[in-house]
Amino acid sequence: MGESMDMQMWIRALKAARASAGVSQERLSEMINYSTSLIAQIETGRRRPTMQFATACDTALDTGGLLAELLDMMNRKESPSWFAPWRTVEEQAVQLRTFQPMLVPGLVQTEAYARAVLTGSGLHTPEEVEHLLAGRLARQELIKGERPKLFTAIVDEVALRRVVGGREVQRDQLTHLVELSRLPHVRLHVIPADAGPHAGMAGGFVRATLPDGDEAVHVDGVFGHVVDRPDAVDIVKRMWDILLGEALSERASVELIEKLVSEL
């Protein structure tokens, strides 16, 4: 994927700042606690920088906030701007892990379910709904295309019981999950409702593992954001392990989903 002209300019600005400060990629890695391989990927356009990365570079290279300002301007041109950094990450990932407490994860939503979610928010015009829906369905090629990513989802039972778009839409969505669970690269786990409070109640997230082993996280919210600071990623990894421990096995999870289908 070729980077945009704006991204090329941003990369040139980063390289110029490094050159002016006499800082190599290796030295910058030590200064901002990001891997050298990640810095190299960003400087060759294979990874998109996050605002955290830009801010860290501004501090290390004493640029007066220039890199963060340029990145913010670039993000504002894209729609939705807050999701742009994650698109590049998930496309390059070899494995995606997601936890969702309130709804079925976007990458495994049916078209009808996704449309109901986007419409039900009340935040989008009909035209915007169709635009966002098309983007979401296109992204599903990440796990349904010729070279699918390894995909694991942990979903709260509450999300599966929430009727979205009506009983028929919800039934078709749950049936779709059962069908996807048969794919060798897809794993589904459900946290049962009787598990009580758990580590994921604050919100959903997606973990992406890149080819070099680095990880980035997309934290959900009204405006989602990408987290790639090693200490923050480590916290999400621990949360994932705790949630997986609370979840049912794959077989028991699918059996529960099938039971919910029969109840609709």
Image (spheres, grey):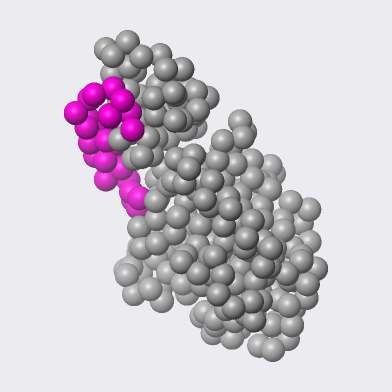
Residue drawn at 47 percent across, 46 percent down: 232
Quarter the C terminus occupies = bottom right
For the question of whether residue 71 can be seen, the reply is yes
User: Left or right: where does residue 15 sit relative to residue 257?
Assistant: left
Residue pushed farthest bottom? 263
Residue drawn at 67 percent across, 61 percent down: 244
Location of residue 263 with respect to 196 vertically, above or below? below
Bounds of the magenta segment: 56-82
For the question of whether residue 145 can be seen, the reply is no
Which x, y percent locates residue 226?
43, 47
User: Left or right: where does residue 198 sit relative to residue 52?
Assistant: right
Which x, y percent locates residue 21?
28, 14
Location of residue 173 with respect to 64 vertically, above or below? below
Q: Is residue 60 magenta?
A: yes
Instruction: Place residue 179 in its image quadrant.
Output: bottom right
Of residues 225 and 181, the one nearer the viewer is 225
Of residues 86 and 194, the one nearer the viewer is 194
Q: Is residue 256 magenta?
A: no
